[in-house]
Image: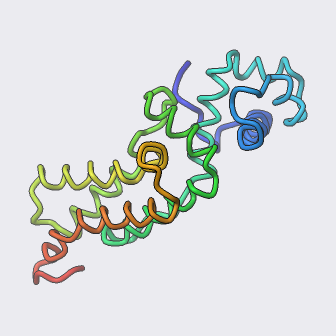
Amino acid sequence: MGAPVPPSELSGTQSAILAAYAELIEEVGTDDVSFRLVALRAGVGERTVFRHYPTRADLLLATAAWIERTVFTRADSDSIFDVPIAIREAMEAYDRRPELAYVVAETAMRGVNGSDPAPHREEFDGMLRREAPSLTGDDRRAVVAALSHLDSSATWVTMRRELGMSGRDIADAATWAAEAILDPIRDLGGTDGQRP
């Protein structure tokens, strides 16, 4: 099993299968969904599902990657200092579709869905290089790592399951943490010491 196929490269049939499985996950969970049920929902034959996704694990992992890329998408931030808002919006999106957030988080935490565990890492690094050019490489990597960790469904699941937090509290905590990470570097931008 290789890396997941980007949504733009999926066939119509593959997209229908993954969308059908995502719908069924929200309705009944992952354990009670058969290939037959996915095929019926997608409007294809059961053999077609097996041809594209030979095992339950293949189907689950492909669906998790599809969910991450299509359901939990968000616009890129213009400034590193806008990232806390984007993280808040991501946490709110996970809270609106918790079953899907769990699937994405659990496969990503196991490192098996082939998706990038920190999809915005390069974006964060580029913004920091522009907006806080005097930040050392080690400090920049630490900020990128911290923001990447916060910017994940795994963080939402951890706060929900392990800490028993509500959706609003999760969004508040993640936003606060991101702000706390960025506050020390607010004055490092540009040549005149002002935020760009």
Figure check: 186 above or below 35: below
Occupied quadrant, residue 193: bottom left
- Residue under the point 70% across and 21% down: 53
- Considering depth in this image, is 98 or 7 the residue closer to the camera? 98
- Residue under the point 17% across and 68% down: 132
Query: In the image, 169: left or right of 178?
Result: right
Q: Is residue 155 visible?
A: no
Figure check: 189 above or below 116: below
Q: Position of residue 16 (x, y in %)?
A: 79, 39
Q: Residue furthest front?
A: 164
**Quadrant including the N terminus:** top right
Query: In the image, 104: left or right of 99?
Result: left
Figure check: 156 above or below 107: below
**Quadrant including the C terminus:** bottom left
Q: Position of residue 184 (x, y in %)?
A: 15, 69
Occupied quadrant, residue 33: top right
Q: Position of residue 36 (x, y in %)?
A: 86, 23
Q: Is residue 153 visible?
A: yes
Figure check: 185 above or below 29: below
The number of discs equals: 0
The colour mode here is rainbow
Occupied quadrant, residue 103: top right
- Residue under the point 63% across and 58% down: 96
